[in-house]
Amino acid sequence: MKTGQAWRVGMGDMQILPGPRHRPPMKRPTWIIVLVSLVTVFLICAYMYPPQSSAACYVFSSRGCEAISNWLPPAPARELTDEELASRAVIRDILNTSPTKSEKSKIAFMFLTPGSLPFEKLWEKFFHGHEGKFSVYVHASKEKPVHLSHYFVNRDIHSDQVIWGKISMVDAERRLLAHALKDPANQHFVLLSDSCVPLHNFDYIYKYLMHTNISFVDCFQDPGPHGNGRYSEHMLPEIEKKDFRKGAQWFSMKRQHAVIVMADTLYYSKFRDYCKASVTKCYFISILYLMLKPGLEGRNCIADEHYLPTFFHIVDPGGIANWSITHVDWSERKWHPKSYKARDITKQLVKNITSIDVSVHVTSDEKKEVQMWPCLWNGEQRPCYLFARKFYPEALDNLLLLFSNYTTI
């Protein structure tokens, strides 16, 4: 009975107290939870599995992969492949080999030409009196050259067709190196074209190359369409986009570097397979096509402009000077560098070229960034150039007159 009374009292109390205000059931922010979860999953996946295609990056940022990488945590160091480990072991041992320079050391002058060399008489003046300090090798890709100087007679090597923009250009360079390496006295290797001329006397060039322990390989980073725009992601994992470099093909390298170029198959195969220029029978149409459509996943990629710069940047970046000792004038910003005719040959021209002591590169992107650094020779700023191109054959007589006495240049 007491219990029932208590119940009635309790019910009465509840009726006297004001009733609670009606509140709608609270809606949980489900969409926020889902969004945060998706972003978290995306960040984890992006960190563990970075995009293999640059197109995927643009889904999330108009700036591409670079913007994403700026706010992602640093990725763990990549484990080298078996091929990379083997390659780097061989390269390390070769680079650690002490050079065997002596009074009998020679410079190998390697000429890459379609046929006859129009400046043989000039080179003959340059070589005269320095027998035993140089070797000559000629790779003629189109026709057998007719030689006018005894220094070039019987110096032709087995040659093959060379197509501009193709890996065959790199093959020709390697072929020249292979023949020049047969002579153990050759300690420095200079690649020259049929339009190249020397700017100094032989002794000056010999000392410049022999008394330093670096190679003169042109190398710089170009983020534009004619630089990194030619990169192919098929080169991964051995060649990453951040390591892709560009430079002029006209190199001068020490013997250890020549040997590792010949020993390389790993990086060479990447450029052979994935750095290809779309070249037509018409040279000018090919150039126009490359200018208008530079990328396309490794297509329109010029192997001789990227293979050696990228290779040395990866395996021995401190062993190269990052500029070429062969001068080429690109100041006109045309498809071809400036060419010199007979009327252009003056003492002032030579003085202007030989006084340059700063290396200049211009990127191909919209910024047109000018990259400049001093030409350092054993830590001392020195003139950059020992050779120059491109000279028309008609300039020969004026060049002979200008360089009539190489001993005073």
Image (cartoon, rainbow, N blue to C red):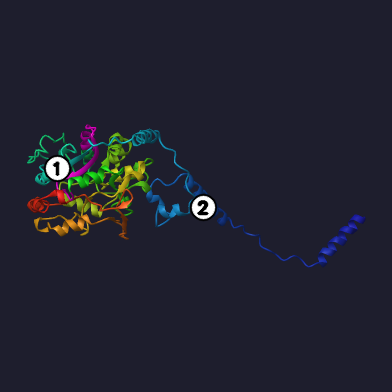
Instruction: Using the rendered image of the protein, determine whether residue 165 is visible from the camera's viewpoint.
Output: no
Give coordinates of residue 247: x percent, y percent.
27, 49
Classify mark 1: helix, strand or loop: helix
User: Residue 371's quadrant in the figure?
Assistant: bottom left
Q: Residue at x 11, y 34 (%)?
A: 154
User: Residue 120's quadrant in the figure?
Assistant: top left
Vertical position of residue 260 compared to residue 376: above or below: above
Q: Residues within 10 Å of mark 1 (few under 14, many from 20)?
A: some
Camera-side residue of 345 and 299: 345
Vertical position of residue 158 compared to residue 228: above or below: above
Give coordinates of residue 5: x percent, y percent.
90, 59
Instruction: Using the rendered image of the protein, determine whether residue 101 is visible from the camera's viewpoint.
Output: yes
**Quadrant of the image for the N terminus?**
bottom right
Q: Which residue is mark 1?
A: 127
| Side of 143 where 65 appears, left or right | right
Q: Residue at x 37, y 48 (%)?
A: 242
In the rendered structure, which disc, 1 or 2, sits on the residue that comes first in sequence?
Answer: 2
**Is-magenta flag for residue 195?**
yes
| Side of 381 where 19 appears, left or right | right
User: Which mark lies nearer to you, 1 or 2?
Assistant: 1
Callout 2, which amino acid? Val
Q: CA distance from mark 1 to mark 2?
A: 69 Å
Q: Residues within 10 Å of mark 2 (few under 14, many from 20)?
A: few
- Which disc number belongs to residue 39? 2
Q: Residue at x 82, y 63 (%)?
A: 14
Q: Residue at x 39, y 57 (%)?
A: 63
Callout 1, which amino acid? Phe
Q: Which residues are magenta?
A: 174-200
Classify mark 2: helix, strand or loop: helix
Is disc 1 in contact with disc 2, using a CB cutoff of under 8 Å?
no
**Is-magenta flag for residue 183?**
yes
